Amino acid sequence: MENTIIKVGGMSCQGCVKNVTGVLTALDGVASAEVSLEAGEAKVAYDPAKVSRENLKGAIEDAGFDAE
């Protein structure tokens, strides 16, 4: 497992947090995702053999948020 922190822009409420958490945990290879509205980031534990950091960012962007 690897851990990464992805900056997430465009979140304005807890509904946004649930949305981002949901799209990340739905990905095969993601063990956990902790999304913080206050920090504007997602802490993700994932298996790099199954999913890449770029895939994580893509899922966030597909949900309508900015990811760095």
Image: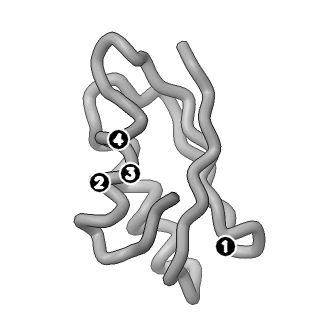
- Residue 59: assigned label: 2
In depth, the one of 8 and 15 nearer the eye is: 8
User: Outermost residue, right direction?
Assistant: 38
Labels 4, 2: front one: 4
Q: Amino acid at mark 2?
A: Ala
Q: Amino acid at mark 1?
A: Leu
Q: Nearer the N terminus, badge 1 or badge 4?
A: 1
Q: Which residue is mark 1?
A: 37
Labels 1, 2: front one: 2
Q: CA distance from mark 3 to mark 4?
A: 5 Å
Find numbered disc 4 in the image and state the secondary structure of the residue it sits on.
helix
Q: Which residue is mark 3?
A: 57
Quadrant containing the N terminus is: top right
Whether the residues at callouts 3 and 2 have beta carbons within 8 Å, the answer is yes
Q: CA distance from mark 1 to mark 3?
A: 16 Å
Find numbered disc 3 in the image and state the secondary structure of the residue it sits on.
helix
- Residue 54: assigned label: 4
Q: CA distance from mark 3 to mark 2?
A: 5 Å
33 with respect to 58 (left or right)? right
Find numbered disc 2 in the image and state the secondary structure of the residue it sits on.
helix
Q: Amino acid at mark 4?
A: Glu
Q: Nearer the N terminus, badge 1 or badge 2?
A: 1
Whether the residues at callouts 4 and 2 have beta carbons within 8 Å, the answer is no
User: In the rendered view, would you say 50 is above or below 36?
Assistant: above
Whether the residues at callouts 1 and 2 have beta carbons within 8 Å, the answer is no
